[in-house]
Each structure stands twice: as C-alpha cells, then as structure tokens.
Amino acid sequence: MQHVNIICFASATKMLEKISKAAIALSGDGVGIELYKSIDEVYVRLCQPRASGCILVLCPKNKKETEQIISLHDVLSGAKIILVLPKRDKDSVRMAYKIFPRFMAFADEDFANITMVLKKMSGLSAEAKAQD
Amino acid sequence: MIKILVVDDDKALCNLLSQIIAGMGHECARAHTIAEGKAAAASGLYDIIFLDVSLPDGSGLDLLPVLRRSPSPPEVIIITSAGDPDGAVLAIKNGAWDYLEKPFRKEQITLHISRAAEYRRALQSRQRPVAFNRDRIIGSSARINECLDVIVQAAAGDASVLITGETGTGKELFARAVHENSSRRNGSFVVVDCTALPERLVESVLFGYIKGAFTGADRDREGLISQAGGGTLFLDEIGELPLNFQKVLLRVLQEHRFRPIGSKHEEESDFRVVCATNRDLAAMAKKGDFRSDLLYRIRSVAIHIPPLRDRSDDIRELVKHYVSKYCERTSIGIKGVAPEFFEALIAYPWPGNVRELLNAIEHAVSIARDDMMLVPKQLPEHIRIHAVRASVGSKIRKQSPQRKTISDFEKFPQLQQLRDSALADIERQYLSDLVWQAQGDIEKACRLSGLARARIYGLLKKYGLSLRT
C-alpha cells in the first residue's frame, strides 16, 4: 500500500487533541501522522518534500489563522485538505473556500465524519479498497 | 481571404481545386508529396489544407498529427480515391475537419471551404483575452493551447463542463481556470471529492440537513450545493458517485433545486457545475455503471487534458518553473539543469503525469542541495533506468534495417517471396526488441518469447544478433 502522511495543524490544544484522536485511529499500516501547533511550523514542514499522498487536516482557531492559511496557498498545492472551521457563518465558509478544501467540517461537531473521510482518502476503508 | 494548401500528387486535381479556390477569392498553394506538404505547412501560413491519403512518399494520414500539433494548426480536409472507413475514423480522431472521397462535386468543395473558413474566423475572434488567468497551468504546447482555447469558450458561458484526463494531469487546475475566468469568479469554488466521500455522507454533505433530521443532526447544516450558489460546484471524479445518487443529482442539475435532509421545503441554488473524471464515462454508461442522461447533462462542454507523454514539449517549461519554485521554497540556491537531465525526463513515459514529474523534480532538488546543477543521478532510480533502456533500445532499433516494400524488389515479387521477406523482417525486429527487453538474460528472453533456449540462439545467429545489448 502507498504511504500516506496525515499532517495536522491546530493551535488550540483541545482541538489538536480532538483531531489527533481522529487521525491516530488510522496510524500504522502505511499511514504516518504529524502534529503541528503553529502556522510557522506547518509552513516549514510543507516546504520540505512530502509524499504525493499527503493529507492536511487544518483547524484554524479564528479568522486570523484562516487568513494565514490562505496566504500559504503556494505550499498547500497538491495536498488534499480537510478544513475544520471554528465558526459556521457564511463569511467564514466563503473565506474557507479560498483554501480549496476537499472536505469541510466544524469544530463543534463530532469528528466521526472526519475519521470516515480520512479513512477513505488514505485508502483504508472497505469502500476505498473495493474501488482499487 | 484565407490561404489554402492542396497536397495531392494528382496534378489535374490540384489544378481543379486551385481554380475553385481562386474563384472563391482565396489564395491557393500546391504540394505533391508529404515532404513538400510538410515543408509548406511549416510556414504556418495556411488556414485549410486539402490532404490526399495516397501520396508517393507515404500516407497523408501520417502527416495529419504533425499538422495538428503545429502552433497554429490548420483545418485539414482529407481526400482520397479509396473508400476507407477505418482511415476516415482515424482522420477524424486525429482532428481532421472532414473526409472527402473522390470524385467530388464542386459544391461539396465550396461548402467545406466556406464552413471551415467561417470556423477559422470565429476561432480567431475568440483569441484568449489578455487578462486570461491560467493560474498554475504551465506549458505552451499545441495540445495545452487547445485546452486553454476550450476553457476560454467555457468560461464565457454557463454551460456544464466535463474535464477528462488521466490521474495527475491537473484536471482541478483546469476546473479552477474555468471558474476564475468566468463571471462567477467572485463566488465560491466548491470541491466535492467524490472519491473521498463515504456513500452514507454523500446526501447530507451535498444537500445539508435540518436539526433533528437524523441521530447526530443537533443543528442545521448548509450543504455544498447551497454554498456553491453564485459560484461553481466542482464534482471531482464524478465516475465514483454511487449509481443510486446519480438520479438525484441529475434532477438537481436540471432544476437547480434541492431539499435538505429532513426539510419540507425545496431550496434554490444558482451554481455552475464542472465535473472531472479519469474514467471513460461513455463506456461506463454502456455497461450501466453511469447514467447516460447524467452524462449528457454534464458534458455540454468537454475538455480532454492530454497525458504528459503526449505533450513532452512542455516538460522543459515545467521543469524550469518548478525547479526555481522548489529551490526558492527550500531556501537553496537556484540550480542549473543539465541537458541529460531533460533528456532523461523526456524519455520517461510519466504514467503519473505532471504530479509524478513534480515529485521527481522535488526529489532531485532535495537530493542536489549544494550541487549547482541538476543531473540524472539525482532523479528517482526507476526514471534513470528507463532513460538508459530507452537509449540502448533506440540504438538497437537504429541498427535494424528498414522493412522491405514491394518497390525494394528488383522485379515484382511472387506472393511467397514477399511473405518470406516480411516474416524475416518481423522476426529480426522481434529479436532486436527481445534482446533489449531481456537485457542479456537468456532465461528472461525464453520467458518473454515463449521460445526454447536453442531456438532463440538459432534465431539470433540467423539475424546476426547477440543477447548482449
């Protein structure tokens, strides 16, 4: 199976714990998890070579962090992005589409859906395997 | 006035066509062989080319792809005296305007010229706008320019667009270009990744739901179709959508109305749909795996992104762009690129297309670090191996004599004589290729060819070949 890197970013500790739980459920079996607490750290990481099957789970805690992520567009290209937004209002959602996420969720939701999408993106789900 | 080239060895026909063309007020030039035609067409002056299939130095059908790959490809009308349905299909597939069988009437000729001329005029008036935003679409090959021309057309309207192409060709970039150059550019570009969405989430993600619609629906949630209102809904890998959902989607695309799960009311959304797939949806529709009515609905404008191996002219441009980008990103000095580096990349068939190329460049840049120049040694091993094999293979092929044709015999051959000669040519070519594939390994040669060791040695001796490449 192809190696998949899941790179998670959340500056809020609670959110990092929540997203790492969702991602760590998939670790092993060709899936590597990396956790980052600051935008700068994640930027430095994304400047380095990464596997083509790279998935980013980005959880900005506010509008400012969303804007910072948008400004990273150059290093985000080519990665599959799952975005977890802090707010549900139309402006936040509209702004988030500038990041071109392939799945969007909200911080106050149960992360079961994110785990399902991560499984499918990383080729671990039975559905994904059936398509291979 | 437009310029027309007639490539036909029948001089009487050339005269006749010239008269008709001049009578219509257009300019006409003539060529009587493929070589002459190729040279004349290289000037890039011609809008229309009448091209005969049977020419003294080969088939006009072989010249057609060359003409279509030129920077400003002319419209090509194939002419032939022989009824050849397969040739006609091949001609159309290779981009011919039409296919005419001799003898033809004057009206047929004038009609074809008028229509092709009208099409050329319309095409020229639709030149890419100066402010056209191609974002990260790199390349200036004829194939990419053709795609960009269709994007300009698509962006000007609101029709649904289907983008096809192999994995890694960059279909999403082209979809974004449609959105960014359209009047919807200020709206959202909403991606639906059909390969990543679990079947049970498809409806709730696309349509949204209201509080209490199902267990876990503890508040209202807006769906992607609603969020795409005023913008573009991009259904990536639409071929993966479950069949039972395709019917529901078709209705939404027709009416632009949908009902969130648990809601009693329908909602409207003004979105434009762009789809992409690496699968043959027409073949899937024939097998019943994809709804044909949905296919017709999403395919108003079709854009096929060529695989990288079919636009190797773009590899240099892609390499230069991304080498400087990766060097800048990793804060290492800009590097030069050795000619052998390009040669190795051009020789490789790129099954993973541009995505695979970018990975290879990133790999090479990260390995090179302090080196001033990128050389093949820094490329992934499988690419270097392919380059070496291709180079050895081409040397062997160059050494192989050309296959004999009837004109190579001193007098007209008997059928058996021609058959024996053709068989010998095929055997010799096969053995050359086998030697290349087996790389000196007799066991491998036996396995590949299905021949016994003694038989292989016998054939190698007969044709003066050696297992060593």
Image (cartoon, rainbow, N blue to C red):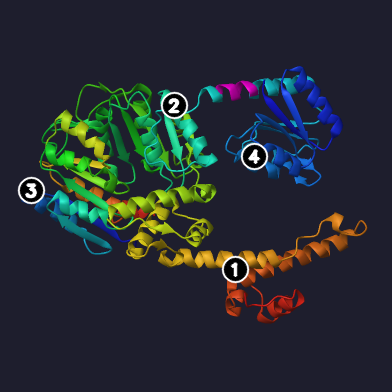
Mark 2 vs mark 4, CA separation in Å: 25 Å
Per the image, the residue denoted by label 4 is: B67
Q: Earlier in the sequence, mark 2 or mark 1?
A: 2
Per the image, the residue denoted by label 1 is: B392
On the image, which quarter does residue B429 sit in? bottom right
| Rendered view: B412 above or below B459 | above
Parent chain of label 4 = B
Q: Is residue B267 magenta?
A: no
Residue B460 in percent (x, y) is at 71, 76
Camera-nearest label, 1 or 3: 1
- Magenta-tinted stretch: B117-122
Per the image, the residue denoted by label 3 is: A12
Q: Is residue B6 visible from the viewing direction of this image?
A: yes
Q: Is residue B449 visible from the viewing direction of this image?
A: no
At 41% across and 30% down in the image, what residue appears?
B132
Q: Are marks 1 and 3 on the same chain?
A: no
Camera-nearest label, 2 or 4: 2
In this view, the residue in front, B193 or B251, is B193
